[in-house]
Structures are given as C-alpha cells and as structure tokens.
Amino acid sequence: MKPGLKVGDVGRLEWTVDPSMIILLGGDPRAAVFSTPNMILLMERAAREAIRPFLEPGEESVGVDVQIQHVGGAGLGASVRGEARVLTIDGRKIQFEVEAFVEDLPSTGPRRIGHGLHTRALVSVERLIENLSKQSGSGERAMNLKSNTGPLPNFRTLLVEIDKSICTVTLNRPRVLNAVNAEMTSELEQVIAWLFGHPEEVRVVLLRGAGDAFCAGDDVKELPGFSPEYARELSYRQAELYLAFERLPQPVIALVHGDAFGGGCVAAYSADMRIARHDARFAMPEIKLGWPPGYGIAQLTALVGKSRALEMCLMGQPIAATRALEWGLISEIVPGASLMKRGMQIAESMLAMPAEALRATKRLVHLDEGSHAKVAYRADTDAYIRCLQMEDAREGIQAFIDKRAPRFRGK
C-alpha cells in the first residue's frame, strides 16, 4: 500500500435506492425498504473508497469482518450515504467505524440508519485469482488483458489494416465461413491487447468477415479433440475477449454480411454498433448441436430482452436482418455493396469528434448498464461443458460433420 492513509481518514459513497436494493416486507409493495445486506454493502464500499487512492497496482482490499446494527429504514428512491472512518491500521488490515445515513427532508437533515465496525485486508489480485483457480480445480486460464504497447503481431487467421486511425479487423478463414478456432481465439486476444495499448494511434475499430459470411461461430469440428478442461478454458477465453470489446478505448463497429451464428453472433452483438447487409442472418444455434450457448447470453439479453433472447437460444433458428433491426440487435441495414463504405463513413464521423470525449462517452454508456460485472458466462460455460460430454452433444457434432439432421434422444 502507498503511504498516506491515516487514522481518521473518511471514505464516503452515495447511492439511490433502486429496485435491486430493496426487500418487500410482508410481500407488500408499499413496504419496500432498503435491505440490510445492501446497507452493509454500502458501508463496506465506503471503506473500500477510503483505501482505493492508496492501493498499489495489482492490489485490492477485501472485507474480512463486519459487525453492523440496522437502526432505521429507507424507502425506494431514497438517497443513502455510507461513511467509513479509519480507526486502526495494523499492517495490511484496516479497521473502520462505519455508518449509513438517509437524506430525509432538507429541514430534518440526514438520519442514521446503520452503524458498526468493519475490517478490510489488502490482497494481491493475482494471488487471489490463483487461489480461486486452485479451489475450483478447473485450472482455467483467464484472458491476459494487459496492454501491448509494442508493434502489431503477425497473424494467420486475421487481417488487420490501419488507415487514418481506423483499424479494420477481418476474420480471415473464408473456407470455413470464418469459424473461430483456437488459433483465431489467440489472435483475437492479441489484437485486443494491442488495441488497449494504442488508444491514440487507433481511435475506431471495424470488425468484419472475409468471403461469404461474417462468422459461422466456433469451429465445431475441433471439439472432439478437446478435453473438457481445455474446452472450458477456451470458452472462458472467448467469453472474456468478446466482453473486452466493451472495455476497449475505441468504439467497435461490426459490419455483418451473410451468417453471424453462435460465437459469430456474439462477436457481432458485443460490438458497440452493428451495421448489416440485407443478406445478414443472426442465430444462436447451439441448442441444435446439443448444448446451450457457452457465453454471450448477458449481452444478448441486454440488447433484445429476455423473451427474444429465449426465443433465439431455445429455438436456434436464424433471424433475418430486418427482424434483427426491429429487435435492436443491429442499428442499420445497408445495400450489399455499401457495407464497408457505410462503416468507414461512421468511423470517419467518429474521428471528427474530440478523442477523449469519445472514449469517455463509450466508457460511461457501458458503465451505466449496472455496477455488477458480467460474470454469468462462467455458469454458461459450466452448463455447456456438462452438456458437451453427453450423448446428445456427440450426436450433434457428428450430424454437423455429416451434414444431416441430428437424432437426439429427447430425454
């Protein structure tokens, strides 16, 4: 920890009580109150805010003890504030006196609704990740999101071109409709790391596919050769690389023609904007192969809503560009010959905007989706790996290879 934190320092955090923070007493919506767990979380996060300016890179604080009394209530929409005052600093442990207040009428001022003691410990994030991996026994490797400030690597499955601060990334396995194999996964990770490291040199990214399709999804023919452990690791990495689109400093624009299926559909809708040709089709067809989507459900549901996400994932049927536009999966349909031209027009219009404002706006829009990180893909992958080892999945893969309809057991 950096020097400077001292006894008496205070961390503060303000929230507005939203529906995710309440409990209905007696099941009555008129008795919707700020829940005790969320009040405790508010005070813990206030303590975290007190420590945050003094953390070294790769260091974080975690709660190790909490003793709280809940002494008052706050309703839906109320403004609540957590305060944490440093009481003691004992090596890598910091103890706080914590309080929570609700802002009532201006004439009455803040009212205390909770108080107590809370202790936080400083930890190494890398060591924490290692311990969690050992406990899970899965041995998965998270994607390395460290910036690469060096030269652009050479690629075999991608074409990467830079012109006027616009980077065009082309998925380049046209013979298999740009299906994403393990090699392409690694190269996409490398591109993302490089883009993180070059926010000034590259300000907008265009993502497209070579040949007759945008991307047919993950390379199913590779799956029989994967152990469950490696399939799990690869699925985690793919989920994380598409989620990384949100965190890139550059806006990402997907230019979709032909099929965007499975992982290819996820790649498209993980971009910040999606422009499509009239012949584009979007599908999440994993169910027809014998397993659920291994990742991407959170992004899809955020775009089209739960009902339409369920329809796409449970039925596995492709939807046309016109329906994708109606559902909000894409933002525009253009004639076939105009796809790249339209993408460049949008990219160039973004280049005319102030660079830092563009980066900040993208970050804030994604931040406003909610304070909780998208981690549900880990459950997605667990279900995918479990189903992948079943007889129906083996039949689905063989049917795909044989180019015939699968004969599932139906049980």
Image: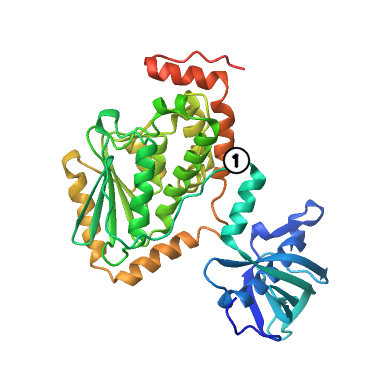
Q: Residue at x 28, y 62 (%)?
A: 203
Residue 22 screen position, x and y as percent: 71, 59
Q: Is residue 81 left or right of residue 141?
A: right
Instruction: Let me know if residue 65 appears in the view.
Output: yes
Pick whichever, 139 or 327, lies toward us: 139
Crowding near the residue tagged with mark 1, few <14, some 14–19, many ≥20 C-alpha atoms within 10 Å: some
User: Which residue in the structure is indicated by mark 1?
Assistant: 138
- Residue appearing at x 39%, y 62% in the figure: 362
- 311 versus 203 height, above or below: above
Q: Quadrant of residue 75?
A: bottom right
Residue type, mark 1 in image: Ser
Q: Residue at x 39, y 45 (%)?
A: 269
* In this picture, residue 192 sits left or right of residue 151: right
Query: Quarter of the image containing the N terminus?
Result: bottom right
Q: Quadrant of residue 229?
A: top right
| Quadrant including the C terminus | top right
Is residue 323 found left or right of 49 in the rendered image?
left
Position of 272 with respect to 19 (left or right) is left
